[in-house]
Structure formats: C-alpha cells, structure tokens
Image (tube, helix red, strand yellow):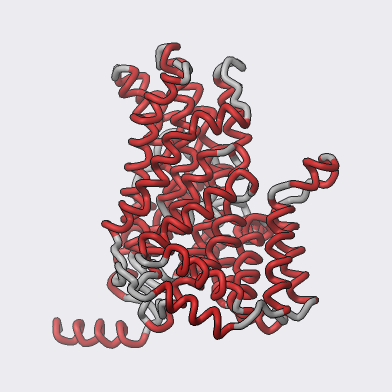
Amino acid sequence: MLTKLKAAFRYFNSVVPFRLGPALITTVVLITLLLLPVPEGLTPKAWGLVAIFLTTIIAIILKVMPIGVMAMMAIVVLSLSQVTSTSSKGAIADALTAFDSPLIWLIVVAILISRGVKKTGLGTRIGLMFISLMGKRTIGIGYGLATCELVLAPFTPSNTARGGGIVHPIMKSIANAFDSDPAKGTEGKVGTYLALVNYHANPISSAMFVTATAPNPLVVDYIAKATNQNLHLSWTSWALCMLLPGLLCMLVMPLVIYVLSPPELKATPNAVEYAHTEMAKMGPVSPKEKVMIFTFALLLLLWANIPAMVFGPSLTLDPTVVAFVGLFVLIITGTIDWDDVLSEKSAWDTLIWFGALIMLAEQLNKQGVIAWFSKGMSDAIAASGVGWAGTAAILVAVFVFSHYLFASTTAHISAMMLAFLTVGVHLIPPAYVVPFMLLMAAGSAIMMTLTHYATGTSPIIFGSGFVTMGTWWRVGFVMCVVELLIFAVVGGVWWKVLGYW
C-alpha cells in the first residue's frame, strides 16, 4: 500500500503544474487557520480573509506555482468564499478592484518604457559609460547606481518611476554588458548584486526627502496631527534631519550587500578599455537613442513637477499620467512598436500578481483587520509596563515589520501610522517624542526593503529575474535592521546636535 502511495505521489508530482509537497503544506495551513477560533474583535469573514492572505504569502514563499498563478488563486478563492461580500458578483468586483490602481499601471508602463532603453541600445551605451567611469570593480558600479538614485530623489516624487523607470534600465544594461543575464543563468556574475543595490538605494533615498516618494507628505501630516502641530516638518527640515543617517546608509548599503550577496565578478580587469571599445563600435548616438533621451528628460521633468513649480499647480500631473505620456511618445515615434508592448511578459505578469497583493492588503484594511491589529498592539504595549525606550522600540519595530502584510506603503501608512504615532505621544515622555517621530518617518520608507511586493519599485526589479525570492527576503531583512539601527543611533545623535530633543 505504501509503495502504491509513493508511486502515486511521484506520478502526480511529475504531471501536475505545481509542487505537490509545498501545495499540501499550504493547504494544511489554510485549513488550520480556518479551523481556529475567530479572534475577538474580528468577524468570521474578516478572519477568513486573513487566512486567505497568509496562505497566499506562504504559497508564494514556498513557490507552489509561479507567483502570477498564486495571485490568481487568491482571486479565485476570495471570490468563491465571498469573505468580502454577500454575493459572488460583489466578491469578484472586490477581487478585481486593484487592477484600476494608477500605481499598478505606473509599474506596468515603467517596465514597457524600459524595453525601449534596451531595444534602442541607449541602456547599453549608458551602462558602458558607467563602466568606463567606475567599472574597475563591481562595487564601484554599485556606488554609481546609488549615486544616480540619490541625485534624482529630491526631484522625483515617485520612487517607482525613479528606481524602476530610470535607474533600473541602466542597471540591466550594465549587467548585460558583462553577459550577466537571468535568461542565460548568468545573473550571479554581477546582475544579482547590482539589482539589489539598485533596489535598496530606493528606500534610503525615499527616506531622505519629502518629495522622494508619494506617501511622505502624508507622514508629515500625521506627525503634525499626532503632536498637535508642535512638529511640522518642512521640506528643508526633513532633508536636514535625514541627511547624515541617510548618507551613512547609502554609504554602507553597497558594502553590506557585497557581503550578503557577493558578485562572482568582483574585479573587472580591462573593463574600462572594453567599455571604450564597445562604445566606439556603437558609433554616434542614433536617432532612436535621441528619442529615448528626450523621453527620459521629459519624464524626469514632469515627474519632478517642474512645470507646476514654474507655472502653477494646474500643471501638476499624476506620475502614472506622465508614464503613459512617455510610453505614447515611444510608440508614435516608432522607438518601440505595439508588438513590443504585447510581448513584454514581465509587465503583464506583474500586473496580475502585484494587483492581487494590493487588493488583499486593501481588503484587510476595509474589513477592519489592520485597525484591529493596531488597537491590540497598542493595548498590549500600554498594559506591559515596559519603559519608554522599550515602547518606542516596539512601536517602530511592529510598524515597520508589519509591512510584510502590505503591498503598498501608502496603504500601510494610511492604515496604521497615525494610530502608532498617537500611542507613542501618550506613552513616551515629551522630551523624547520628536526623535521617535523622526524614526517613524524614516521607518515608513525603510520598510520598503523587506519584500518583493513592498512598493512599486520592487516588482519591477524583482520581475527582471536577477534576484531569487529567498535572497530578496534575506537581504531585505538584514538591510532593514541595519538601516533602522543607523537611523536610531546616528540619527538620534544627529537630531540631538540639531536641537530637536
């Protein structure tokens, strides 16, 4: 009997389109969660939604099937279970709500635009320029990417547009110049390291300027509300407070990643000569490359909101609108064609899986799960009797690491931050409230490091295939801890010097 069962298991494992062992584990997790008593404060449907969300995350981690299929599974299960509605029609409407999100389409269009960078050869040319300037060692190229991210950050209010739409195509071209390509199985040469640096520069730069990512103005507003308008950060005061710890994080980050995920090619002898030789072969900049340069300049100008600054707020454009303008320019000029758009599988794959994860996070908020979690945490801290330092550490840690439950920094901040700030004001002595607020502000960006769905930039870079999910989560956790410590220790001293406490 046992032999027949083993034979049946091997047969199904070889023919079904999923990994049977992880699939069984995931199923057991789902059933176990559903059989547990519903926690006080949650409805049975809300708890069912929690079970679906956690099961989906576990299925993705265990790689039961491709991530897009797991996302589709979540949509199907949510629709059939009707945990968000009283009918299947309402449930499927809820399941598909995120697909009209401008953020998702910004990600998709940014991926499509990056195809033009590769097709025209402009990305290769830029990559060769970086190699010629800083290419004697791989870590030098990493610092070049981090510098590029930092320079763009004050003027680019969409971290997705910056890290995914501008810097990432450059990073891919540099990797390809060293024949580091996931399609060839050679991503470990330099691509994995550079992709991680490309990504982790993005949360750091987002923490350094109010205008570096969309949720930061909301953070400013919440801090002002929680402190009864006693602390209202301006653009300048935010930048000054985050300057020293942010620069230190940017300096340390490529080194830490170099240790955690070292490139196979550490030294790149003759890289400078190689870059000059290849650029000479490419010849002068082609007309299509010039269109790409013009498009990038246009995107950067509009993403930086320069027209609105010069001519007034009526010319303010949403980052997604700007991305579509850029894509349209590329198509009507023949720089890319419609077949390029249709054949960009990573863009459409990202649309499915990231849309599903955003939907689940939004539904958790709508069903009151996030509010329930925040209140429970606040009550537990108040009842524990820990000192103010412990209270601050717990609030920051729980707020930051609960981002594992979110696919959007804006959704996370909207759902939880004001509650946590308010608890901090009540439990932390007034003399230490300001550094707590500043650390929470930094944490609201640093939490982007954690997962491959943490913010709009992550699915673009993760979707390029240079980094495995295990490496992404491992490096993300370590970098999150390192950067929080830098902001807490160095930032705390810096804020003392500035007279904030």
Residue 422 position, x and y percent, is: 50, 22
Question: Residue 233 lies in what quarter of the image?
Answer: top right
Regarding residue 27, the answer to whether it shows in the image is no
Q: In this view, does 323 lie to the left or right of 168?
A: right
Residue 473 position, x and y percent, is: 35, 56
279 w.r.t. 313: above or below: below
Residue 299 position, x and y percent, is: 71, 59
- Quick one: quadrant of the N terminus? bottom left
The residue drawn where x is 30% and y is 69% is 267
Q: How many marks?
A: 0
User: Furthest residue to the top?
Assistant: 430
The residue drawn where x is 69% and y is 52% is 303
300 w.r.t. 439: above or below: below
Between residue 389 and residue 53, name the one nearer to us.
Answer: 389
Q: In this view, does 93 lie to the left or right of 485?
A: right
The residue drawn where x is 41% and y is 59% is 142
The residue drawn where x is 37% and y is 24% is 493
Between residue 59 and residue 232, name the one nearer to us.
Answer: 232
User: Furthest residue to the left?
Assistant: 2
Regarding residue 419, the answer to whether it shows in the image is yes
- Quick one: quadrant of the C terminus? top left
Residue 340 position, x and y percent, is: 65, 81
Q: Is residue 419 left or right of residue 383?
A: right
5 w.r.t. 21: above or below: below
Question: Residue 386 lies in what quarter of the image?
Answer: top left
